Image: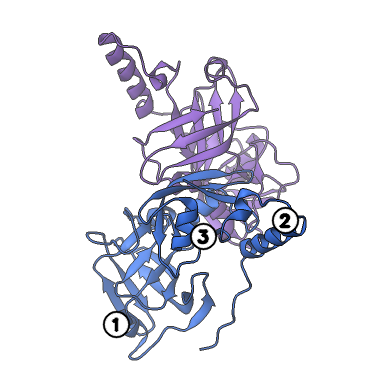
Chain colours: A blue, B purple
Amino acid sequence: MVAISPTPHRAVVEHLVRQAVYQRLRKPLPKSGAAPNPLVVNVSARHCHLTPEAVEILFGKGHQLTVHKWLYQEGQFAAQETLTLIGPRSRVISNLRILGPCRTLNQVELAYTDGIALGFDLPLRISGNIKGTLGCMLMGPAGFFEMSEGVIRALRHVHMSPDDADYYGVKAGDEMRLKIGGPCGLSLDKMLVRTDKNFKLEVHIDTDEGNACNLQPDTLCEVLK
Amino acid sequence: MVAISPTPHRAVVEHLVRQAVYQRLRKPLPKSGAAPNPLVVNVSARHCHLTPEAVEILFGKGHQLTVHKWLYQEGQFAAQETLTLIGPRSRVISNLRILGPCRTLNQVELAYTDGIALGFDLPLRISGNIKGTLGCMLMGPAGFFEMSEGVIRALRHVHMSPDDADYYGVKAGDEMRLKIGGPCGLSLDKMLVRTDKNFKLEVHIDTDEGNACNLQPDTLCEVLK
């Protein structure tokens, strides 16, 4: 498995530079600089998570996902492998990226724009909560795999460590607001807080949300209670 | 020209019912009900505006746009005619709706999602301000028309009459905020105020913005200073 370590995210570099500059100037840090960790906001394009069994059916016996690009959360990656999704009205999405490593459930995360293109009424769900949702057919080079459920729009959410949760005064399951600046800025309500000691502070929004505000690497973002 | 008068927008019916119920109960109206006019929020899918000359080149000598559906603003309509747009990298958008009546300039309004699909870096502009923007090729049944400029993402905006502007305490050119409720609600900043004595109170957002919050006919919306 060959994979290049990613360049640090712009928000991480900015956070470190900000802290160093204020320290050198012996001035108190502004609120955003005083946070224990930089805020990274990433747009998740449509993708799927698969079980090892589904990977074998789609790509062949014994196949393992290969790393295309490491993601910001430790150990998570975009795989080189992609799939074709066939919706309930026989409409198709090609090049659906798989995210690794494998999970214990199969789940496809689409934007509402994708759902409209597929003629699919997507339910808004917390990732992992797929009970009672519609499924789809996946097509890989070695075969077809029918998902009986699991096609969702993922609820916007922020990953954070317990330290970050303490700093922002929130706990797992709380809702926060994400303020995004720029000439077509907006504030996203009801952003779910997810905590784990291994999580790096990162917001995941989808392409509809990212395009609504034209999120760029240098757009100012802020999480608020 | 045959066109059916549209059913009143849900927000209009709600506004009238709310006023009637509170009057019958002899109770003071809540803030939203006390506004002079109902707030209608509509999602503009990608579309274009054309000059009469462009319509003739694309659809044939003497051709006039025919009404497919009347829009909320008086006299505005979605035409039956659609076009094929060919972007600078030869990628295509089919069935691009034309809005009528004809204008004095040619303008294509796309969402950033469309821009990404076309490989197009869309500028964010106030409708009508297209100087220095990129163009595209349009293809109709009678011929091609090359737009030298005019492909934009339109800035989110609210149409209002001077009465509405007085009520909200704003004037043309001001920026307001649009709060949209629901399970993935958001607030859109920097919504431009446009006033005209013939305007009905209506917000126009694009499909990225509408899909980011899954705007439905019964989603609660509010304009704020």
Q: Percent x, y for residue B57? A: 64, 44
Question: In the rendered structure, which amino acid carries the disc numbered 1?
Answer: Glu
For label 1, count other residues whose C-alpha is less than 10 Å away and answer few (under 14), some (14-19) or many (20+): some
Question: Which residue corresponds to the image point at 40% horizontal and 49% vertical from the top-left?
Answer: A175
Q: Percent x, y for residue A123? A: 31, 54
User: Quarter-wise, where is residue B121 in the image?
Assistant: bottom right
Q: Which mark is residue A43?
A: 3
B180, A198: nearer the viewer: A198
Q: Which residue is mark 2?
A: A22
- Badge 2 element: helix
Which of the two discs, 3 and 2, labels the residue nearer the N terminus?
A: 2
Q: Which residue is mark 1?
A: A53
B212, A58: nearer the viewer: B212
Question: In the rendered structure, which amino acid carries the disc numbered 2?
Answer: Tyr
* Residue B17 falls left or right of residue B82: left
Chain for disc number 1:
A
Question: In the rendered structure, which amino acid carries the disc numbered 3?
Answer: Val
Q: Percent x, y for residue A198? A: 44, 70
Q: Is residue A86 visible?
A: yes
Chain for disc number 3:
A
Which of the two discs, 1 and 2, labels the residue nearer the N terminus?
A: 2
Tell whether label 2 touches label 1 (CB within 8 Å).
no
For label 2, count other residues whose C-alpha is less than 10 Å away and answer few (under 14), some (14-19) or many (20+): some
Q: Nearer the viewer, mark 3 or mark 2?
A: 2
Asked if labels 3 and 2 share a chain, the reply is yes
Q: Is residue B140 visible?
A: no
Asked if labels 1 and 2 share a chain, the reply is yes
User: Quarter-wise, where is residue A86 in the image?
Assistant: bottom left
